[in-house]
Amino acid sequence: MPPRPQQPQHAYLPTGKVRRPGGIAYYEPVPVERRYLVQRVPAEVERLTPSVTYQGWLSLDPHGVEICVRQSGAECMLTFLKKQGQQLKLEEEMPVSRSQFDKLWLLSAGRRLTRLRYTLQAPGCEALHVDVYQGKLGGLVTATVRFANADACQRFRTPDWIGDDVTGDPRYTNETLAQV
């Protein structure tokens, strides 16, 4: 058995995201994110080209591991998620071929969503994504804001086009929306 790779030292607890590029494991902090409803889509979105994401759940177990398959552009991923309540504890992603994605996609019937994602720049956050849901979720628009840490999240001032914070609302998780 090969020796276990050493984990890098970080200033956070090792409960973060595990990545295994080339078979080497290391920890990243679990991102601090907030999800909001969008009251009105900002005008700057019209100048951007969205990424189209197709996401389907193969396993939905709120008390265990959830498994989903996702295609965004040419990238296809198989994702394993472990949550405790609404808190993400572990996320493991691995690339899959387009052929593998197509086969797994068939297994997600009834548990899918499609969204257009626009990435905006906003002061005080690492990323601000406006997600415009398609199909049966047409009309739903959310904003997901990612922060470097909890302090940045606390200091963030939402733009006037952002509405209610639905971060802890189970009705607005992607897993729930995929089942609508």
Image (cartoon, helix red, strand yellow):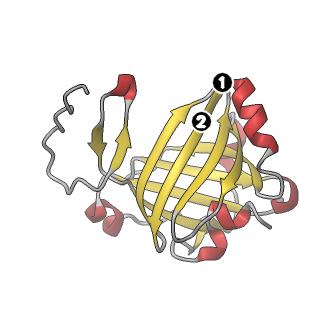
Residue at coordinates 51% horizontally, 34% vertically from top-left? 94
Visible in this render: residue 31?
yes
Q: Is residue 178 placed above or below 172 in the rendered structure?
A: above
Sequence-earlier tag: 1 or 2: 2
What is the C-alpha distance between the residues marked 1 and 2? 8 Å
Q: Is residue 179 placed above or below 29 in the rendered structure?
A: below
Residue at coordinates 29% horizontally, 57% vertically from top-left? 149
**Which of the 4 image quadrants contains residue 137?**
bottom right
Visible in this render: residue 160?
no
Task: Count residues near mark 1 (Cα–Cα under 10 Å), then give few for <14, some for 14-19, many for 20+.
Answer: few
Q: Where does label 1 land, which residue?
A: 97
Q: Which SS class for mark 2?
A: strand
Lateral position of residue 15 relative to residue 103, left or right: left
Q: Amino acid at mark 1?
A: Ser
Q: Amino acid at mark 2?
A: Met
Looking at the image, the residue that sits furthest to the right is 135
Q: Position of residue 27 (x, y in %)?
A: 28, 43
Residue 101 vs residue 75, the one in the foreground: 101
Q: Where does label 2 land, which residue?
A: 77
Q: Which SS class for mark 1?
A: loop
